[in-house]
Image (spheres, coloured by chain):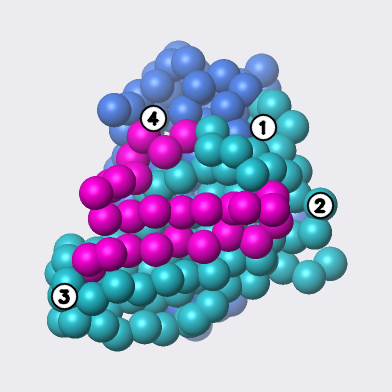
């Protein structure tokens, strides 16, 4: 099946720095992408999403960028805080207008105080 | 609003035994999903319900896994008989269910260990 992968399995950043988590996807038909944060012992928590008709979307301290030409998705976290330490997953829908999500492997973000 | 409720949180069984997990989605959410998350991996969809009907169960190992959502609200996922490779966290999620992009809200998961 189609795959959603991440370039780096782990990322360590200093508190206060900006973090960038990257994700490559291979299903060119996907029209919806989403980032989830998963803390230890908890279920994935929604961070931000973006539709394929957009290139960029901003939330509180987070920005998602979508480059459909190279099938690349990134999550930028501004002024990273210790509470941001978690595993981050990108996911895509399996087909246009489909509701289910196909997840990548995840990147573990560690914030160094 | 209340989140997605799952139980039990933890379960340890021996291989060839059976286990059942329960999920109560967010009120009003028509779509319910069961995902399997093996340690170190992303969640993998097992089955998707729209109300009480199955939308997608293509990844469900039907020889041992079964799921139901009889009244279109709560759902149960059963494994019988369990294998060692079934050790994972079983995540339930729900969404409003309209066609197109929907944010899935996940429960905390049920961690299964098969010995």
CA neighbours of label 3 inside 10 A, class few (<14), some (14 to 19), many (20+): some
Taking B15 as reference, is B64 left or right?
Answer: right
> Label 3 belongs to which residue?
B15
On whether disc 4 and disc 2 are found on a single subunit, the reply is no
On whether disc 3 and disc 4 are found on a single subunit, the reply is no
Q: Is residue A91 above or below residue A96?
A: below
Say which chain tag 3 marks: B
- Residue depicted at 52% across the width and 42% down the height: B48
Contact between labelled residues 2 and 1, with CB atoms less than 8 Å apart: no
Say which chain tag 1 marks: B
Asked which quadrant contains residue B6, the reply is bottom right
On whether disc 4 and disc 1 are found on a single subunit, the reply is no
**SS for callout 2:** loop
Nearer to us: label 4 or label 2? 2
Instruction: Report the span colored magenta.
Output: B56-82
Q: What distance separates the C-alpha of mark 1 from that of mark 3?
A: 38 Å
Contact between labelled residues 1 and 4, with CB atoms less than 8 Å apart: no
Nearer to us: label 4 or label 1? 1
Task: Give the mark, 3 or 2, whose residue is nearer the N terminus.
Answer: 3
> Label 4 belongs to which residue?
A25
- Residue depicted at 60% across the width and 34% down the height: A99
Give the drawing colour for chain A: blue
> Label 1 belongs to which residue?
B101
CA neighbours of label 2 inside 10 A, class few (<14), some (14 to 19), many (20+): few
Query: Is residue B83 in sight in this rendering?
Result: yes
Taking B61 as reference, is B26 left or right?
Answer: right
């Amino acid at each position: 099946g189609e795959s959603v992968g991440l370039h780096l399995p782990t990322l360590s950043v200093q508190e206060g720095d900006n973090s960038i988590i990257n994700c490559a996807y291979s299903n060119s038909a996907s029209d919806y992408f989403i980032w989830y944060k998963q803390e230890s012992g908890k279920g994935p928590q929604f961070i931000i999403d973006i539709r394929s008709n957009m290139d960029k979307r901003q939330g509180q301290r987070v920005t998602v960028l979508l480059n459909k030409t190279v099938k690349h998705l990134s999550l930028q976290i501004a002024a990273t805080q210790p509470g941001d330490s978690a595993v981050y997953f990108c996911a895509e829908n399996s087909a246009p207008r489909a509701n289910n999500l196909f997840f990548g492997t995840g990147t573990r973000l560690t914030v160094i105080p | 609003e209340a989140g997605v409720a799952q139980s039990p949180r933890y379960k340890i069984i021996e291989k060839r035994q059976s286990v059942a997990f329960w999920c109560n989605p967010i009120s009003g959410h028509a779509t319910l999903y069961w995902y399997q998350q093996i340690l170190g991996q992303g969640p993998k969809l097992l089955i998707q319900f729209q109300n009480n009907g199955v939308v997608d169960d293509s990844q469900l190992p039907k020889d041992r896994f079964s799921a139901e959502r009889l009244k279109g609200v709560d759902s149960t996922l059963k494994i019988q008989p369990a294998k060692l490779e079934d050790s994972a966290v079983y995540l339930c999620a729900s969404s409003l269910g309209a066609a197109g992009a929907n944010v899935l809200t996940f429960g905390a998961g049920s961690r299964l260990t098969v010995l």
